[in-house]
Image (cartoon, rainbow, N blue to C red):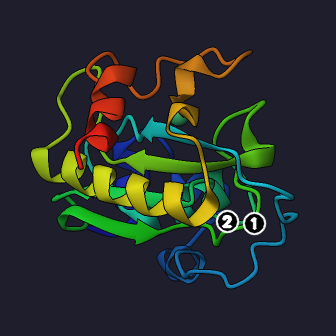
Amino acid sequence: MKYLEWLQQIGFRGEEAGITEEEAAEKSQPLSNPGSTLMKSVNRIIIHHSATETGNAAYFRVLHRIVNRWNDIGYHYVIGNGSLSGDGEIEEGRKLPFRGAHAKGGNEDSIGICLVGNFNRNNPTDAQMSSLGLLLKKLIAEYSIPADSITLHRLIQGSSTECPGDNIRLHNIRYLIDIK
Ligand SMILES: [Zn+2]
């Protein structure tokens, strides 16, 4: 699928912004320096869904750069659902420890992980959840993040979102990391 077609499918018109397919493809490329500040410390991990049926890191980077006019993709990691990347495939988004743009009020000290899908309608795949568990364990160890500092976007103070959807509850996430 082409970027502009995908943007249109999720409700945005690339042509209206005067963007060509070539420019979108250029903006899909990973950035070694997204231009945001470096986080002084990483204390939390915040879980998101994309609220789209399809996607991957490159498509979300195009969405965030073109539609939101951000420097780079907002999330630090994207976990695919088999639509535009592998089922359970972990992709890097914005480079750590650059500050992300994924949860108002939580960006200054957190890692943002997005699972592709709309979990108000569907469930995450088994492969997505098992990859999420592996990624969480790795990040918890790497950044010395307490297990109880893993949270959901909708639980961030001041947020007004259903993200990551009804079908993901905090205990589903905690369950993943309690299993050794
Ligand atoms: Zn979110």
Please say whether residue 35 is visible from this viewpoint: yes
Q: Which mark is residue 98?
A: 1
Type of amino acid under label 2: Asp
Residue at position x 24%, y 50% from top?
Answer: 180
SS class of the residue under badge 2?
Answer: loop
Image quadrant where residue 11 sits: top left
Image quadrant where residue 131 sits: bottom left
Residue at position x 36%, y 62% from top?
Answer: 56
- In this rendering, the answer to whether 36 lies above or below 106 is below
- In this rendering, the answer to whether 146 lies above or below 170 is below
Q: Which mark is residue 72?
A: 2
The answer to whether the residue labelled 2 contacts the one labelled 1, judged by CB atoms less than 8 Å apart, is yes
Residue at position x 65%, y 81% from top?
Answer: 31
* Sequence-first disc among 2 and 1: 2
Q: Nearer the viewer, residue 118 or 18?
A: 118
Type of amino acid under label 1: Phe
